Image (tube, rainbow, N blue to C red):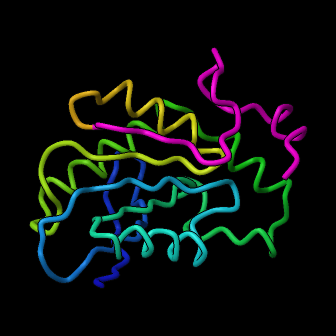
Amino acid sequence: MIDREIDLQTKDGAMNTFVTHPEEEGPHPVILLLMDAPGKREELHDMARRLGTAGYYVMLPNLYYRRVREFKIQESGREVMHEHMASLSNAMACEDIQSLIDFADRDSAAREGKMGCVGYCMSGPFAFAAAAKFPERIAASASFHGVYLYSDKGRFSTSRCGKHNR
């Protein structure tokens, strides 16, 4: 397996992203794995690697990059996590996903064309928003343990996040 941490330039700054894929038999189909509220961390890197060992090129971005390069819930607490979560919107996630698509299109290890997008918990709505925004690129989207899968607000609100129990 090839694992690497890259910085993707977006209009809002450098989005640190974990990329993993098999060393051989590429190019590999792309899966975008969107983080849950506790942030991009080793447990999610392991989830990405698991998909990678099945033959996929997996990209796991830090969606909180506009606020913090590395979020550690143990140090910051749930209140800060909810603030980070509330700072995101479907539109912002789709802008970030466009940057991921653009990077994958330039990487010879990533297969061209359709890809999958998986949202974990808070990112479930982002995976569905991406499928709607990029139907020519996202062949399938899924949400694991999704929250707020339907909202006319297009973003999380702090008051709703405060009621979210894990």
Occupied quadrant, residue 149: top right
Q: Quadrant where the N terminus lies?
A: bottom left
> What range of the chain is rendered magenta?
138-166
How many labels, in total?
Answer: 0
In the rendered image, residue 109 lying in the magenta stretch gets the answer no
In the rendered image, residue 149 lying in the magenta stretch gets the answer yes
Height in image: 49 above or below 129? below
Residue 61 rendering spot, x and y as whole percentages: 45, 60
Could you tell whether 10 is left or right of 105 in the image? right
Could you tell whether 93 is left or right of 110 in the image? right
Specify the farthest residue to the front: 54
- Please name the residue shown 84% across and 58% down the image: 78
Residue 102 rendering spot, x and y as whole percentages: 21, 49
Residue 138 rendering spot, x and y as whole percentages: 30, 37
- Please name the residue shown 17% across and 62% down the image: 110
Residue 51 rendering spot, x and y as whole percentages: 40, 67
Could you tell whether 89 is left or right of 27 in the image? right
Q: Nearer the viewer, residue 67 or 46?
A: 46
Q: Nearer the viewer, residue 88 or 141?
A: 141
Height in image: 86 above or below 103? above
